[in-house]
Image: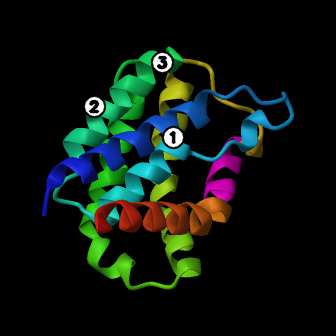
Amino acid sequence: MNSRPIFLIIFASLIVAMILMLIPLPDWARPYRPEWIALALIYWNITIPKKVGVGIAWILGLCVDVIQGALLGQHALGFAITAYIAIRFHQRVRVYPLHQQAMFIGMILLPYMSLSLWILGILGEDPKTWVYWAPVVTSVIVWPWIYLVMRAVSKKVLMF
């Protein structure tokens, strides 16, 4: 199998996820933005863990840190932990129905969000409301569509 098309698909999906992360939203919708990059990363960790591993997650997290102006390493560590958990359980998760996969996604996003909350607390910028956890809920809700779209695109491109 030629690895060039799959590399292009992975790269394109991560770029699209970054664009979705950067799209401006109204003030009321900003806290509910799904974790697009984490979802794309988890999809590839579950689908082809040997090509998208913890190192890619770390590099991607550093890029997000630079783009968002966050503490360098904050998202990198969170994405690396998320990728490790997804890779560790990828064989089980692949056979789950979509609603169970979505619950798994929520469970592995919790350590990522908890780590970010801890770092924000150390910096004195901790959120004061429960809305901080809203991206976990919206990510769980959008996971089935993310999974189906990315699976269809990757299968269609790999058929050629």
Q: Amino acid at mark 2?
A: Ile
Q: Amino acid at mark 3?
A: Ile
Provide the secondary structure element on which disc 1 rests: helix
Label 1 with label 2: CB-CB less than 8 Å: no
Q: Which residue is mark 3?
A: 67
Q: Amino acid at mark 1?
A: Ala
Disc 2 or 3, which lies upstream in sequence? 2
Q: Which residue is mark 2?
A: 59
- Location of residue 15 in the rendering, given as x and y in whole percent from the top left corner: 44, 35
Cα gap from disc 2 to disc 3, whole angstroms: 12 Å
Q: Residue furthest front?
A: 160
The answer to which of 24 and 105 lies nearer the viewer is: 24
Q: Which residues are magenta?
A: 132-139
- Location of residue 147 in the rendering, given as x and y in whole percent from the top left corner: 51, 66
Disc 1 or 2, which lies upstream in sequence? 1
Disc 1 or 3, which lies upstream in sequence? 1
Q: Residue at x 27, y 78 (%)?
A: 91
| Quadrant in which the N terminus is drawn | bottom left
The answer to which of 124 and 51 lies nearer the viewer is: 51
Provide the secondary structure element on which disc 3 rests: helix
Q: Residues within 10 Å of mark 3 (few under 14, many from 20)?
A: few
Q: Residue at x 38, y 85 (%)?
A: 95
**In the depicted structure, whether residue 48 falls above or below residue 133:** below
Cα gap from disc 1 to disc 2, whole angstroms: 15 Å
**In the depicted structure, whether residue 113 falls above or below residue 95:** above
Q: Residue at x 32, y 81 (%)?
A: 92
Residue 5 seen by the camera: yes
Q: Residues within 10 Å of mark 1 (few under 14, many from 20)?
A: some
Q: Which residue is mark 1?
A: 17
Q: Residue at x 30, y 71 (%)?
A: 90
- Location of residue 65 in the rendering, given as x and y in whole percent from the top left corner: 43, 22
Q: Residues within 10 Å of mark 2 (few under 14, many from 20)?
A: some
